Image: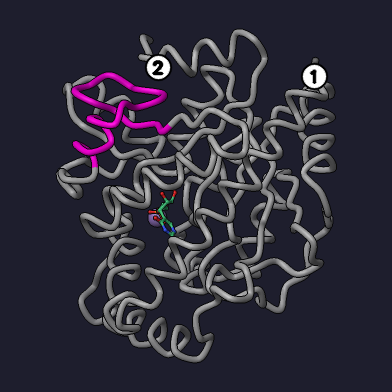
């Protein structure tokens, strides 16, 4: 398969430099224009400021791209939902039809691994949906983590999902789950989920050592590094929780199912919290980007 790798990304990979992959569903389906463009540009800048090369991943006119120009980023941000939400199962179809795809965590991990990028930063991964034991709605992000050796830096998962079952499923898939400077798995808008993680990490170097060991052992499975939202950016837990409850009910009443649930929930929670969830979202993605870049630099030093 031909993948268009931006020259700057290819050069960094060839010299064993620090590169951080970024997803595009968050741009096209997770935030409104122009905030999405502003965030995408700022997140790339944070990665650069911390010494790594950003590689945003998307499918443009049927061609998977790793590393986008500022014009391409703008095209994504303006097109929004016209870019198909593309998880692993959608990749072949989007490519075959010459379509445009915004890659989710699963698809972004797939392409990152294909070109040799071991670290990927996002806001939140998908998980086991509430009532997932009946609907079997389990994000392919979790199975991808089970079979693709990429370390994903995220703020945990949102409590729109069933967090305890998400962690159980990650265990089943053999995914290393670590939390950064805490023993508790974070729940995106808040650092509290009530769930403990099996592994705690306290520095970028420690994260890099785990990624290095995972690679040397050929474990072939992924790593989830969960970073709590910075305290000053945490949105009001009560406000968010009541918005989530209301949106869940609406989603049920409207019979929204499948891959439409996550974008619907994100949009409704944003509306119901008067946009405060969006600001928290942007702040934590940038925080994750800084740590992801620091880990990429530490890993590059370790492997020199
Ligand atoms: N959760 C968020 N924001 C997001 C997503 C999840 O808080 O933007 C996106 C990510 O791209 C993730 C995808 O990979 O939604 C999961 O979708 P689904 O639940 O349909 O697998
Ligand atoms: Mn799903």
Residue 49 location (% of width, % of height) = 56, 39
Q: Mark yes or no: residue 128 visible.
A: yes
> Along the horizontal axis of the image, is 287 left or right of 88?
right
Question: In the image shown, does 211 or 49 lie closer to the viewer?
Answer: 49
Image quadrant of ligand 1 equals bottom left
Say if 223 sits above or below 181 in the image: above
On screen, residue 182 above or below 113 = below
Q: Judge from the rendering whether residue 19 lies leftward or rightward of residue 304; answer left or right.
A: left
In the image, what residue occupies the spot 28% across and 69% down? Answer: 267
In the depicted structure, whether residue 212 falls above or below residue 44: above
Q: How is the image coloured?
A: one colour
Question: Disc 2 marks which residue?
Answer: 6
Kindly identify which numbered label has been placed on residue 303: 1
Question: What residue range appears in magenta?
Answer: 56-76
Q: Quadrant of the C terminus?
A: top right
- Pinpoint residue 18: horizontal percent, then vertical percent: 63, 26
């Amino acid at each position: 398969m031909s993948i268009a790798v931006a020259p700057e990304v290819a050069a960094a990979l060839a010299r064993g430099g620090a590169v951080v992959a970024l997803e595009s569903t968050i741009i096209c389906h997770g935030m409104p224009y122009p905030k999405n463009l502003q965030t995408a540009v700022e997140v790339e800048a944070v990665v650069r400021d911390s010494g790594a090369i950003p590689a945003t991943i998307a499918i443009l006119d049927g061609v998977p791209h790793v590393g986008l120009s500022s014009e391409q980023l703008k095209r994504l941000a303006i097109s929004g939902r016209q870019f198909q939400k593309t998880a692993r199962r959608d990749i072949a179809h989007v490519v075959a039809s010459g379509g445009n795809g915004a890659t989710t965590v699963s698809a972004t991990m797939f392409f990152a691994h294909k070109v040799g990028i071991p670290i990927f930063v996002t806001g939140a991964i998908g998980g086991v949906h509430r009532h997932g034991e009946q609907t079997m709605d389990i994000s392919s992000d979790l199975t991808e983590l089970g079979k693709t050796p990429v370390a994903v830096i995220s703020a945990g998962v949102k409590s729109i999902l069933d967090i305890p079952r998400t962690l159980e499923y990650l265990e089943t898939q053999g995914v290393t789950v670590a939390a950064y400077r805490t023993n508790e798995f974070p729940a995106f808008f808040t650092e509290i989920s009530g769930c403990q993680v099996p592994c705690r990490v306290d520095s970028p170097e420690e994260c890099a050592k785990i990624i290095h060991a995972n690679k040397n052992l050929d474990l072939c499975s992924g790593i989830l590094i969960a970073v709590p939202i910075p305290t000053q950016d945490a949105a009001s837990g009560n406000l968010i929780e009541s918005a989530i409850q209301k949106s869940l009910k609406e989603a049920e009443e409207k019979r929204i199912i499948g891959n439409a649930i996550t974008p619907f929930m994100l949009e409704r929670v944003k509306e119901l919290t008067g946009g405060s969830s969006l600001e928290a979202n942007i702040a934590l993605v940038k925080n994750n980007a800084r740590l992801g870049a620091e880990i990429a630099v530490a890993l590059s030093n370790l492997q020199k």
